[in-house]
Amino acid sequence: MVDQVRPVVLLLARIAVGVIFLVHGYQKFATMGIAGTTKFFESVGIPLAGLAAPAVAVLEIAGGLALILGVALPVAGALLALDMIGAIVFVHGANGLAGEGGYEFVLALAAASLAVGFTGGGAFALDRVFDRRRGTAPAIA
């Protein structure tokens, strides 16, 4: 039973975490704007804020899409986890784990990114399709 449900659970986890990152990356472009995001990054002491703001926005969009599609999962998971560690260090860490501005949400996103990135995308991941074409993945049951 678990083996039959696992691909669906992995797909749902990838979609949920990926959509969160996708939306946050999109907000950095569309809602806050890169100029606003840069200003915020400067205010919290992020080095090279003018480069970091668009880089983080692109990472969150591309990484979110990678999780949703199930492609390059270890790379996407690791980079998104590093992104969240940066958010803890520069923004949320001083506020403690829980409460107003705390880091519980970004810590959960970091952990989820690593878990999704390194457990494999399951039967419904593009990585699996590409591996099957190379002859290295088992067929979907």
Image: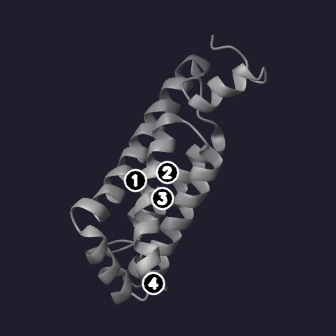
User: N-terminal of the two: label 1 or label 3?
Assistant: 1
C-alpha span from label 2 to label 4:
20 Å
On the image, the x and y values in percent for residue 71 come to 58, 38
Q: Is residue 137 above or below residue 68?
A: above
Residue drawn 60% across and 44% down? 73
**Disc 1 crowd, CA 10 A, few/some/many (<14, 14-19, 20+):** many
C-alpha span from label 4 to label 1:
19 Å
CB of mark 1 within 8 Å of CB of mark 2? yes
Q: Nearer the viewer, mark 1 or mark 3?
A: 3
Residue holding disc 4: 46
C-alpha span from label 4 to label 3:
16 Å
**Disc 3 crowd, CA 10 A, few/some/many (<14, 14-19, 20+):** many
Give the left or right position of residue 74, taking residue 116 as reference.
right
Residue type at tag 2: Gly
**Figure disc tally:** 4
CB of mark 3 within 8 Å of CB of mark 2? yes
CB of mark 4 within 8 Å of CB of mark 3? no
CB of mark 4 within 8 Å of CB of mark 1? no
Helix, strand or loop at disc 4? loop
Residue drawn 48% across and 66% down? 84
User: N-terminal of the two: label 1 or label 2?
Assistant: 1
**Disc 4 crowd, CA 10 A, few/some/many (<14, 14-19, 20+):** some
Helix, strand or loop at disc 3? helix
Residue type at tag 1: Phe
User: N-terminal of the two: label 2 or label 4?
Assistant: 4
Residue holding disc 1: 21
Residue holding disc 2: 63
Residue holding disc 3: 59
